[in-house]
Image (tube, rainbow, N blue to C red):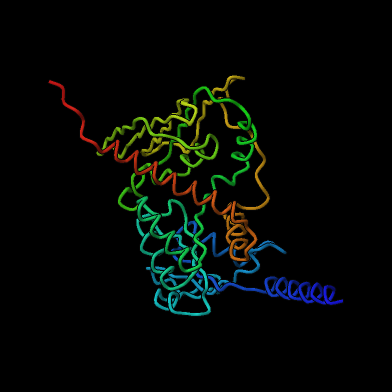
């Protein structure tokens, strides 16, 4: 009888905990109202029914500009966002250069943080901030919507189990202001994340960058080796008028993939998918193993981005 009584008590406590989790809400603020920040507000106002996002309560937004209310969502000051106990989480959608300052402030204030990629523009700073989050028992979530596209999910299925011989990923896009977005290895870290997620850990063998500042054009080329010593190349090319596009040429022992697979567009938006994942983490619904693997991937990609930048910025050798 005593064993049965202990079991009943344990089950009652479990049901109480589950009920408490089911009703838990996280006051959230959006910081930065550009394209991503505006989508974040829209998604939080219209969460998917019965999804983890329903546990996020939009409390307001922070912007350097005076905007008033947006869709009846109030603008609040940065100080109010940091000091308000009703706000437990912040979504950072500012320019890349401002990520570090904002992530640090909100973690120091004891808030959970979702930040757009790249997390920061320094690998050592990323580790420092991640350590801070863990010490404070807070979630630090880095958005990687390019891993959530149906196109990428299909590509990953097609690559799975195949033995790589060599590969290239070439991205083109419009010019960026590097003062705000960072060096191209950081601003383009989504493409680097593709390569690491598809082929595992990489080693940088060389990297160069061609720049035509008067034309606002740049082309970065990074060469890697996989753990099996197979060559991979990543090209990040940006300039006025360049169409946003990704081209692949992945050759395997079984043949080559020269085009991204066609895939239907998901019924759920990319930012909404990412928001659901953040909310799942807040609710404790993501395993420690998944969290650890994601942390490794994010920090490893930042290490590689920094190493690429160092290669590109080394003075050219002069041969006499």
Taking 302 as reference, is 217 above or below it? above
Taking 54 as reference, is 295 left or right? left
In depth, the one of 116 and 41 nearer the eye is 116
In the picture shown, does residue 209 fall above or below 255? below
Question: Residue 66 or 29: which is nearer the viewer?
Answer: 29
Query: Does residue 123 appear left or right of residue 316 in this picture?
Result: right
Residue lying farthest to the front in this orientation: 2
Counting from the top left corner in percent of width and height, residue 247 is at: 50, 30
Quadrant showing the N terminus: bottom right
> Image quadrant for the C terminus?
top left
Q: Is residue 105 visible?
A: yes
Between 74 and 137, which is closer to the camera in this rendering? 137
User: For the view shown, which residue lies furthest in the right direction?
Assistant: 1
Q: How many numbered discs, if any?
A: 0
Q: Where is residue 201 in the image (x, y as percent from the top left)?
A: 48, 37
Instruction: Give how far across and how far down residue 234 sits, in percent.
Output: 43, 32
Q: Give the residue displayed 53% in from the left and 73% down from the top.
A: 73
Q: Can residue 175 be seen in this view?
A: no
- Looking at the image, the residue that sits furthest to the left is 320
Determine whether 311 is above or below 301 in the image. above
Q: Position of residue 194 (x, y in %)?
A: 51, 39
Q: Name the residue located 62 percent from the left edge and 73 percent from the top edge.
A: 25
Residue drawn at (34%, 40%), measured in percent from left and top?
307
Q: Quadrant of residue 152?
A: top right
Q: In this view, does 157 lie above or below 318?
A: below
């Amino acid at each position: 009888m005593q064993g049965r009584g202990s079991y009943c008590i344990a089950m009652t406590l479990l049901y109480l905990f589950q009920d408490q989790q089911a009703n838990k809400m996280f006051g959230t603020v959006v910081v930065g109202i550009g394209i991503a920040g505006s989508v974040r507000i829209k998604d939080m106002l219209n969460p998917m029914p019965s999804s983890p996002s329903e546990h996020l309560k939009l409390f307001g937004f922070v912007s350097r500009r005076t905007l008033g209310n947006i869709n009846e969502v109030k603008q609040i000051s940065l100080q109010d966002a940091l000091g308000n106990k009703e706000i437990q989480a912040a979504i950072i959608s500012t320019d890349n250069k401002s990520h570090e300052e904002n992530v640090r402030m909100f973690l120091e204030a004891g808030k959970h943080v979702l930040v757009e990629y790249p997390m920061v523009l320094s690998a050592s700073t990323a580790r420092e901030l991640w350590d801070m989050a863990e010490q404070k028992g807070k979630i630090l979530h880095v958005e990687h919507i390019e891993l959530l596209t149906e196109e990428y999910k299909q590509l990953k299925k097609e690559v799975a189990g195949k033995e790589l011989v060599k590969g290239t990923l070439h991205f083109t896009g419009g010019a960026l202001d590097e003062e705000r977005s960072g060096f191209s290895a950081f601003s383009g870290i989504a493409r680097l994340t593709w390569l690491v997620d598809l082929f595992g850990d990489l080693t940088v063998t060389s990297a160069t960058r061609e720049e035509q500042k008067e034309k606002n054009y740049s082309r970065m080329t990074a060469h890697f080796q996989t753990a099996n010593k197979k060559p991979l190349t990543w090209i990040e090319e940006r300039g006025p008028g360049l169409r946003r596009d990704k081209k692949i040429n992945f050759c395997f022992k079984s043949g080559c993939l020269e085009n991204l697979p066609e895939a239907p567009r998901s019924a759920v938006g990319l930012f909404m998918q990412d928001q659901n994942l953040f909310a799942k983490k807040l609710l404790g619904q993501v395993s420690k193993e998944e969290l650890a693997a994601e942390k490794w991937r994010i920090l490893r990609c930042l290490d590689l981005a920094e190493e690429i930048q160092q290669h590109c910025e080394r003075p050219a050798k002069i041969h006499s």
